[in-house]
Amino acid sequence: RSLGEETEIVKKQMFLIPRQTETFCLRPEATAAVVRAYLENNLDKTEGFIKLYYMGPMFRAERPQKGRLRQFHHIGIEALGSSSPYLDSEIIALAHGILKELAITGYTIKINSLGCLEDKQTLARLLREKLKDRLNKLCEECNGRFHRNVFRILDCKNDGCKHVVNELDLQYTEYLCKPCLQHFSIVKNNLDSLKIEYQPSISLVRGLDYYTQTVFEISHPGLGSQDALGAGGRYDTLITELGGPAIGAMGFAFGMERLLIAAQ
């Protein structure tokens, strides 16, 4: 429920184990579980703003290849209870700092803003308007995504779909409201002040539906086609969706095995 029904993880990668009358799912990621723990232990009332971290195994039923395993390990952090853009840049700086400490070089930090919930709805309408006359150029799967979850088209790995996305010429001013534009501007200014290099990427949407506002991904050429070392973003609606108050949160996770490959 928290990941989104049309995400790749839910549609293709869930590791389901049927047992008698029940079906169990091995966890594909940890953010939703951390939010549940935050709410079940009333940390929103006793702590308010809190920073947490975790390490542990995750599972996805995928075709194994370089950097992609059925059982892998995440190192992740979550900061819950703040909507400040300064938290966004702090967390991106933390990810950057961890890679520096591990002496990993040659990576690229890509950032984007999806805006608030209303902005995401505006973006979805905008994408459908721009893509409706190009459906014949999209792969079969993206034709289905057009109706179910149009955002998934933006991160399709098919070369033809990538070409169509590049031709869309999306602009932030077309869908971001003024507060969200300002939020993203502060994040970028902070990163500039910290001398952290990044690439704005308007097609970066991340693979989970709970993301809002700032999202980022760190890629490395040494990983092959699965080139993400780690990724994260802001998920301001997830706490509410799981029964909590309307408060912001942000985090990221690194794939431990991918860090080892990149570090050689």
Image: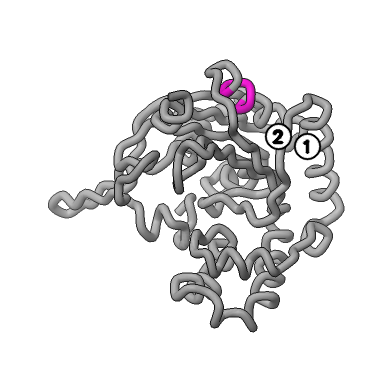
Residue 85 part of the magenta-drawn span: no
Task: Give the total of numbered labels.
Answer: 2
Is residue 205 found left or right of 226 in the rendered image?
Answer: right
Q: Residue at x 62, y 52 (%)?
A: 204
Residue bearing mark 1: 187
What residue occupies the far left of the structure in this picture? Answer: 20
Q: Secondary structure at mark 2?
A: helix
Question: Does residue 15 appear in the picture of this structure?
Answer: yes
Residue bearing mark 2: 88
Q: Position of residue 68 (x, y in %)?
A: 37, 42
Q: Residue at x 47, y 57 (%)?
A: 7
Q: Is residue 190 above or below residue 143?
A: above
Q: Position of residue 212 (x, y in %)?
A: 65, 49
Secondary structure mostly seen in the magenta stretch = helix
Q: Residue at x 50, y 59 (%)?
A: 157
Name the kind of residue labelled 1 in the image: Val
Q: Magenta residues, as a range? A: 95-99
Is residue 22 found left or right of 224 in the rendered image?
Answer: left
Are the residues flagged by discs 1 and 2 in contact, CB closer than 8 Å?
yes
Question: Does residue 39 appear in the picture of this structure?
Answer: no
Q: Is residue 253 above or below residue 153?
A: above
Name the kind of residue labelled 2 in the image: Asp
Q: Give the image quarter of residue 92.
A: top right
Mark number, residue 52: none
